[in-house]
Image (tube, coloured by chain):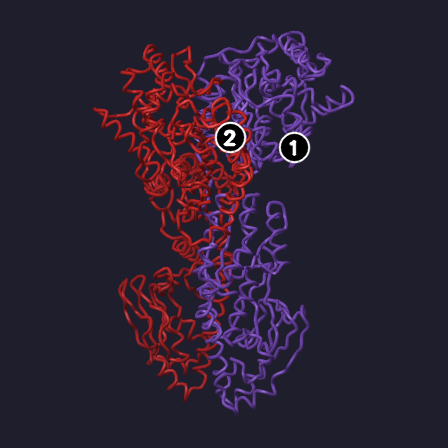
Chain colours: A red, B purple
Amino acid sequence: MTFHQTPKVPLDTAEHPITAYLTRLLDEVSKQNDGAVADYIPELAKADPEDLAIAITTVDGQTYAVGTVDREFTIQSVSKPFMYGYALREHGLERVLKQVGVEPTGDPFNSIVLNNENNRPFNPMVNAGAIATSELLIGATREEKIAAQMDLYEGFAGRKLSVDQAVYASESETGNRNRAIAYMMLNSGMIEGPTEAVLDLYFRQCSILVNPIDLSVMAATLAAHGRNPLTGRVMLTPGQTSDVLSVMATCGMYDYAGQWMFDVGLPAKSGVAGSVVAVIPGQLGIAVYSPKLDAVGNSVRGIQVCKRISDDLGLHAYKDRTDTLGIVRRSYRAGDVRSHRIRSEADMKMLTEIGAGVAITEIQGPLFFGSAEKLLRHVLAEAETAEAMILDFRRATYADKAAVALLSGLPMLLAGKGCRLIVTGLVDESGMAFLADDFFQSSKDGLCEIVGQIDQALEAQENRLLQQAGAGPDTPRLSLREMDLFAGLSAEDFAVLEPAISTFQYAKGDKILSEGEEGRAIYLVAKGEVTVTGQTLNGAHSFASIGPGQTFGEMALMDGGKRSATVVAKSDAMVYALSVEEVFRLSQDRPRIEPTLLRNLVRNLSVRLRSANERIRHLD
Amino acid sequence: MTFHQTPKVPLDTAEHPITAYLTRLLDEVSKQNDGAVADYIPELAKADPEDLAIAITTVDGQTYAVGTVDREFTIQSVSKPFMYGYALREHGLERVLKQVGVEPTGDPFNSIVLNNENNRPFNPMVNAGAIATSELLIGATREEKIAAQMDLYEGFAGRKLSVDQAVYASESETGNRNRAIAYMMLNSGMIEGPTEAVLDLYFRQCSILVNPIDLSVMAATLAAHGRNPLTGRVMLTPGQTSDVLSVMATCGMYDYAGQWMFDVGLPAKSGVAGSVVAVIPGQLGIAVYSPKLDAVGNSVRGIQVCKRISDDLGLHAYKDRTDTLGIVRRSYRAGDVRSHRIRSEADMKMLTEIGAGVAITEIQGPLFFGSAEKLLRHVLAEAETAEAMILDFRRATYADKAAVALLSGLPMLLAGKGCRLIVTGLVDESGMAFLADDFFQSSKDGLCEIVGQIDQALEAQENRLLQQAGAGPDTPRLSLREMDLFAGLSAEDFAVLEPAISTFQYAKGDKILSEGEEGRAIYLVAKGEVTVTGQTLNGAHSFASIGPGQTFGEMALMDGGKRSATVVAKSDAMVYALSVEEVFRLSQDRPRIEPTLLRNLVRNLSVRLRSANERIRHLD
């Protein structure tokens, strides 16, 4: 028995639960001996009836495979959904529907019956429909058409493929029933002919050689909404992929469709060489190869494996995996969680009291109708008791058009309720682009505000709240005497200390302290704001912003060690600097200076620590 | 136009995006005038052809509805999938399959054709199959059977229902084709009869009166895996629900099934009174009512509305919403994120250096095959460079059987790689019970450890790492002199301070400080551990655990204010208490005592603040 695995993670295949499961399944199913190898084409009858392989490929390209996974065989009818996808991509649905329908038929795959209402083949999964579809290959010459055909299958499989010339010749020699079908369609105007040229392309298409892993990658490309997970090449749009899967769901298993939907519940296609592919949208592609067929023309073991996998792995279409409830990651008020802005004790206390009017909602996961509806309901309920709402989309993975339709009116809706909307974490990228566009438009119309990061938005809301409460952080310039650090100093002590203090002006962006420097002074912000930044595993990170009245670099007072972070002026700023050496010198004569400063520091650090712990509790 | 809404959230319906959308849709569709009211039963012909209503109910019971939503009409064929669910629930699949198949038929709903292989009606959505299903109603008398019938439909609708006696009489008088079907089945042994009794139940079933909101709730019950979202009553198991939806998907729209799957892609059922229901598993139920029918017997506007809703809201079965990528919420190492345990500066520094060998993975959302495979791959890759792995399931919403199969072998797999597994946040309830059972079994076998909270597990791992590094936190008992708080005190100063310190013993669970008390002393842990707790919005919360050498209640030194939290002994503990009054008294003669203690406090608070900020960065 051969094991095959794309080596993304070094796995001991024998003990990996997925390969172990597939191996057990393979052993069990190999005991099933019903069915017979197809013999309507002599070449097919040469297949080894004992061959059996199962391959699974995930939407991000991890393959698990067991059995005779290197055996190549002809793709046969499994080629049909992919050629149908080609036709939709190159000609559009409207044009394609003129040539072939989408209705299941109770008749066998090689039925000669056309829909008597409109002469169309019933669907592209029966031979008639597939032949009509093959005629849609684009090219001025046979060579160009063949190149387009190979490019299609190679694009889905993610590697170069070849044609089994013996089967191709055999199909062509013995394909008289298909000739009859083609002439019927030529007669009814469904194909333009010449029939031999169309049939040649169709026979060649059926004779392309693939192995079970190729088929699982092809199925995974459909599971990944049309994008090949190995190569990244986009073969179909999500809409075209959905159309292909719909036809596979109702017509892929011939006159076994109802039972298949009931038992397996997956879009699938079988081929007469003994392969079956099934697609679990958003998750994975499955391929099984075993040449013995049942009376309908489906691989006996292939069907058995699909049934078992669907059941064991819970993959049935109606064993739903949709999660609408997790869309709101966190919801809290500005009274409970602080921004990183370091504020005075009084301001922090004030925010706890007045912050309840600012609601913050963090979103996570995919936004589709069900989850967007939940989100909308949550936001509207929150807005009943909020004057401002921060909506953070940083962890939203995509918004489909229904979500865009539901949410793009939010700025207007909230404005009508007297609740201002601030949108953060929106990126104008792939899945979120349409929603971002709509919100940007609303912000131009003054209906909402777009801010990069949630913390910035929260800080701005805090500032607004404090200003409204008359405790504004933008107090013009704090005099030295107003600094928390000097609270409790006697007038005499302050008079002695004051000359030791220097005043510095910084322009926005100036570096004030650098990580690793010797710490010789303690700083106080008089006006403007500074940002404390440092390196983390994920690159530079802003730790805190510090405004008027607040201290930084205070550890210099302890040990004069190295600075642990870099401080940069966030706006034009005025900063007081107090030499630590001077503090110690002056404290010799005036013993209350040092303990008073230290007590103020302890109090300040305690408040900040409590705020940080509060934040952790809410984040956790 | 009437608006109707379950008033969970006070919404101005006119401007809510969903009702606004439904209203626009209603307006557009009302221009569609094709089709004709059914007249094969005289009573049905009395319906107002202009009636039009759309109702949507979510899986958690929010309804949005527009149009003639209060109009009652007879349920007709929409009753069939629910009765099929009843049969599956009461008799099991095997028994039911003897009486009716699951294969679509190309024939009309009132076809008299039975499957000639086994004499069964093709499926329970055609009249023959529905009549055969109605015979499966349980009851010793007609009254008992009627009671069971009403209980079924009332259970799905979530309210009392009645029967339209005029339609019932009319069905019975004119139902000769159905009589023929019943006699055909009696003849072939598919029903036991007497036919009039069976038909009476069937005619009565078709004559139950519902309004569009009832139907949307019934559909939402199927979307919610069989649980009525209004009443919470479980009508079907998830497996029975999946079987019902499968048959609706292939047979629910008669000979329009392929096009329906292509255009709408949802399990659905239509009724001859003009209603259509469609189900979006995991999201919502849809009901449309408009009496004008097309040639096949489906509501013209009903189909149009479903097409539009499916397209506009992205509800097509193959417009996939599965999200496998978000399963790993956070992944980090113990070197980067600290537990809440307060530790000495030296220990914290040590953990940064040696913590990389402990990997923490937090899981969020539903565990099914696709997401469990991703998680498994992530865990195995992490295990390559970790000696211990904490897996936190607190935010996992459920694990289906495939996820259980994939993950229950993890303890063994990781043990084989020399990586110990610690599982946290597992609750033995509903969706997680099976996985929890398996992990509990593994823990009994010594293959993994089960710990309640992630923070506990992380703290234990930190302790282990520190012990291995010879810096163990479980140092027997710290003498006063070893306390960080007294570092840098001269021997003389310490000698003066020591008599002011008392020693207390606490048993596990004892309360040491209470929130709100006057703070008169500062405490130091000599041995054991204490926990700082307090009330938050979400109830009591443990803020930090404090071990030997660490301080608590230090704010008393500042202002003697009230205690801001409660402190409880986490284990038997020995605690030193230092009277703040004494510190001040002694400092008068020995001026270095106060500033030295304060400097130590500032350093300690700074370290804790930095660790808290570090944690916030990683959590964020």
- Dot 2 alpha-carbon crowd within 10 angstroms: few under 14, some 14 to 19, many 20 or more: many
| Residue B95 rendering spot, x and y as whole percentages | 67, 26
Mark yes or no: residue B86 visible.
no
Query: Looking at this view, is A153 or B56 the one in front?
Result: A153
| Residue B151 rendering spot, x and y as whole percentages | 70, 27
Residue at 27% x, 30% y: name it.
A148
Q: Which residue is mark 2?
A: A300
User: Circle 1 sits in a helix, a strand or a loop, which is it?
Assistant: loop
Q: Check whether the beta carbons of the residues at disc 2 and disc 1 lie within 8 A of each other.
A: no
- Work out whether A165 lies above or below B585: above
User: What is the residue that sits farthest to the right in this orientation?
Assistant: B140
- Dot 1 alpha-carbon crowd within 10 angstroms: few under 14, some 14 to 19, many 20 or more: many
- Work out whether A206 lies above or below A328: above
Task: Kindly report the distance in space between the C-alpha atoms of the residues bearing marks 2 and 1.
Answer: 36 Å
**Quadrant of the frame with the C terminus of chain B:** bottom left
Task: Report whether B84 appears left or right of B357.
Answer: right
* Marks 2 and 1 on same chain: no
Which of the 4 quarters of the picture holds residue B572? bottom right
Q: Which residue is mark 1?
A: B235
User: Circle 2 sits in a helix, a strand or a loop, which is it?
Assistant: helix
| Residue B84 rendering spot, x and y as whole percentages | 63, 25
Count of labels in the image: 2
**Chain assignment, label 1:** B
User: What is the residue that sits farthest to the bottom in this orientation?
Assistant: B492
Residue at 55% x, 13% y: name it.
B48
Residue at 63% x, 69% y: name it.
B570
Which of the 4 quarters of the picture holds residue A367? top left
